Protein backbone atom coordinates (compact mmCIF):
# COMPACT_ATOMS: atom_id res chain seq x y z
CA UNK A 1 0.00 0.00 0.00
CA UNK A 2 1.34 3.41 -0.95
CA UNK A 3 0.19 6.55 0.84
CA UNK A 4 -0.03 9.69 -1.21
CA UNK A 5 -0.02 11.98 1.84
CA UNK A 6 1.72 11.64 5.15
CA UNK A 7 -0.45 10.33 7.94
CA UNK A 8 0.12 11.51 11.49
CA UNK A 9 -0.71 9.13 14.29
CA UNK A 10 -1.93 10.02 17.75
CA UNK A 11 -0.76 7.34 20.13
CA UNK A 12 -2.32 7.03 23.54
CA UNK A 13 -0.39 5.87 26.57
CA UNK A 14 -3.35 3.79 27.79
CA UNK A 15 -2.60 0.81 25.61
CA UNK A 16 -5.57 1.44 23.33
CA UNK A 17 -5.22 1.41 19.59
CA UNK A 18 -4.22 4.76 18.16
CA UNK A 19 -6.53 6.81 16.03
CA UNK A 20 -5.17 8.30 12.87
CA UNK A 21 -5.86 11.90 12.07
CA UNK A 22 -6.74 11.02 8.45
CA UNK A 23 -7.51 7.29 8.47
CA UNK A 24 -7.04 4.13 10.52
CA UNK A 25 -3.81 2.21 10.07
CA UNK A 26 -3.94 -0.81 7.75
CA UNK A 27 -2.58 -3.00 10.59
CA UNK A 28 -3.38 -3.44 14.30
CA UNK A 29 -1.27 -1.19 16.52
CA UNK A 30 -1.05 -1.37 20.28
CA UNK A 31 1.31 0.57 22.44
CA UNK A 32 1.92 1.37 26.05
CA UNK A 33 4.28 3.65 27.94
CA UNK A 34 5.86 0.67 29.65
CA UNK A 35 7.06 -0.68 26.32
CA UNK A 36 8.85 2.46 25.22
CA UNK A 37 12.55 1.78 25.02
CA UNK A 38 15.26 4.38 24.90
CA UNK A 39 18.44 3.87 22.97
CA UNK A 40 21.50 3.65 25.16
CA UNK A 41 24.82 3.71 23.35
CA UNK A 42 27.12 0.82 24.04
CA UNK A 43 29.76 1.54 26.61
CA UNK A 44 33.20 2.25 25.22
CA UNK A 45 36.00 -0.05 26.44
CA UNK A 46 37.65 1.38 29.55
CA UNK A 47 39.81 -0.38 32.11
CA UNK A 48 40.24 1.30 35.49
CA UNK A 49 42.50 -0.03 38.21
CA UNK A 50 43.36 1.46 41.56
CA UNK A 51 46.24 0.52 43.80
CA UNK A 52 48.36 2.01 46.57
CA UNK A 53 52.13 2.28 46.41
CA UNK A 54 54.35 1.65 49.42
CA UNK A 55 54.75 5.41 49.97
CA UNK A 56 50.97 5.83 50.42
CA UNK A 57 50.28 7.28 46.97
CA UNK A 58 47.07 6.06 45.34
CA UNK A 59 47.28 5.40 41.61
CA UNK A 60 44.28 5.23 39.26
CA UNK A 61 45.40 3.69 35.99
CA UNK A 62 43.22 4.31 32.94
CA UNK A 63 43.39 2.26 29.73
CA UNK A 64 41.04 2.73 26.80
CA UNK A 65 38.69 5.55 25.90
CA UNK A 66 37.01 7.95 28.31
CA UNK A 67 33.74 9.31 26.92
CA UNK A 68 30.17 9.97 28.01
CA UNK A 69 29.30 6.25 28.05
CA UNK A 70 31.77 5.50 30.84
CA UNK A 71 32.52 8.88 32.45
CA UNK A 72 30.34 7.89 35.42
CA UNK A 73 32.54 4.89 36.20
CA UNK A 74 35.62 7.08 35.79
CA UNK A 75 34.15 9.66 38.19
CA UNK A 76 33.33 6.97 40.78
CA UNK A 77 36.83 5.52 40.56
CA UNK A 78 38.43 8.94 41.07
CA UNK A 79 36.09 9.81 43.94
CA UNK A 80 36.84 6.56 45.80
CA UNK A 81 40.60 6.84 45.27
CA UNK A 82 40.60 10.49 46.31
CA UNK A 83 38.71 9.67 49.51
CA UNK A 84 41.22 6.92 50.33
CA UNK A 85 44.14 9.25 49.62
CA UNK A 86 42.74 11.99 51.86
CA UNK A 87 41.96 9.45 54.58
CA UNK A 88 45.57 8.26 54.76
CA UNK A 89 47.11 11.66 53.98
CA UNK A 90 48.55 10.33 50.72
CA UNK A 91 48.30 11.84 47.29
CA UNK A 92 46.39 10.72 44.21
CA UNK A 93 47.94 10.18 40.78
CA UNK A 94 45.84 9.53 37.67
CA UNK A 95 47.82 7.64 35.05
CA UNK A 96 46.49 8.37 31.54
CA UNK A 97 49.45 6.88 29.65
CA UNK A 98 47.30 4.09 28.22
CA UNK A 99 44.27 6.33 27.55
CA UNK A 100 43.54 6.48 23.83
CA UNK A 101 40.76 9.07 23.88
CA UNK A 102 39.45 11.72 26.26
CA UNK A 103 36.32 13.70 25.42
CA UNK A 104 34.58 16.54 27.27
CA UNK A 105 32.82 14.14 29.65
CA UNK A 106 36.21 12.86 30.78
CA UNK A 107 37.61 16.38 31.03
CA UNK A 108 34.58 17.45 33.08
CA UNK A 109 35.26 14.59 35.48
CA UNK A 110 38.90 15.61 35.83
CA UNK A 111 37.95 19.28 36.38
CA UNK A 112 35.44 18.21 39.05
CA UNK A 113 38.24 16.61 41.07
CA UNK A 114 40.88 19.32 40.47
CA UNK A 115 42.99 20.34 42.23
CA UNK A 116 43.97 17.48 44.47
CA UNK A 117 45.67 15.02 42.17
CA UNK A 118 48.51 14.72 39.68
CA UNK A 119 48.27 13.41 36.13
CA UNK A 120 50.61 11.31 34.04
CA UNK A 121 49.74 11.99 30.41
CA UNK A 122 50.53 10.26 27.16
CA UNK A 123 51.71 12.35 24.20
CA UNK A 124 48.25 11.80 22.70
CA UNK A 125 46.33 13.21 25.70
CA UNK A 126 48.79 15.90 26.88
CA UNK A 127 47.74 18.59 24.34
CA UNK A 128 44.09 18.21 25.38
CA UNK A 129 45.03 18.79 29.03
CA UNK A 130 47.04 21.88 28.12
CA UNK A 131 44.48 23.45 25.77
CA UNK A 132 41.60 22.82 28.19
CA UNK A 133 43.46 24.59 31.01
CA UNK A 134 43.55 21.54 33.26
CA UNK A 135 47.35 21.61 33.18
CA UNK A 136 47.14 25.00 34.95
CA UNK A 137 45.16 23.47 37.85
CA UNK A 138 46.99 20.18 38.44
CA UNK A 139 50.52 18.92 37.97
CA UNK A 140 50.76 17.05 34.67
CA UNK A 141 53.76 14.82 34.00
CA UNK A 142 54.54 14.02 30.39
CA UNK A 143 53.99 17.44 28.83
CA UNK A 144 56.26 18.58 26.02
CA UNK A 145 59.21 20.53 27.36
CA UNK A 146 59.53 18.51 30.58
CA UNK A 147 62.65 16.42 31.09
CA UNK A 148 60.55 13.22 30.95
CA UNK A 149 58.17 14.61 28.27
CA UNK A 150 58.71 14.59 24.53
Image: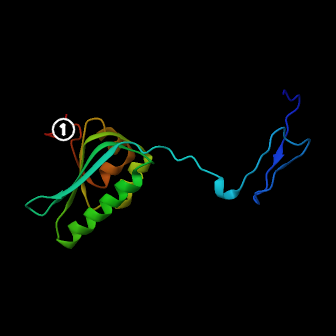
Residue 83 located left or right of residue 76: left
Give coordinates of residue 87: x percent, y percent. 21, 73
Q: How many marks?
A: 1
- Check the picture and name the quadrant holding the N terminus: top right
Q: Position of residue 100 (x, y in %)?
A: 32, 37
Taking the image as shown, residue 54 lies to the left or right of residue 145, namely left
Q: Is residue 131 left or right of residue 119?
A: right
* Residue 112 versus residue 19 in the image, above or below: below
Vertical placement of 139 versus 90: above or below? above
Residue 114 in view here: no
Which residue is nearer to you in this view: 27 or 124? 27
Q: Residue at x 21, y 66 (%)?
A: 85
Farthest residue toward the right? 22
Residue 18 sits above or below residue 126 on the image: below
Q: Residue at x 90, y 45 (%)?
A: 21
Q: Quadrant of residue 13?
A: bottom right
Question: Residue beneath label 1, please?
Answer: 149
> Which residue is more in the foreground, 49 or 67?
49
Residue 84 visible: yes
Quadrant of the image containing the C terminus: top left
User: In which quadrant of the rendered view does residue 92 lie?
Assistant: bottom left
Q: Residue at x 57, y 46 (%)?
A: 39
Residue 68 position, x and y percent, is 45, 48
Near-viewer residue (121 or 70): 70
Q: What crowding class fits label 1: few (fewer than 14 Cα within 10 Å), some (14-19), or many (20 or more)?
A: few
Amino acid sequence: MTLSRPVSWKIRATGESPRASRSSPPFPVTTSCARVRTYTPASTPLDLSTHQRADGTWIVTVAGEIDMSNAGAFHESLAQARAKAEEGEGCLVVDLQAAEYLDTAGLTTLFAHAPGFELIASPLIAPVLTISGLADLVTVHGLAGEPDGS
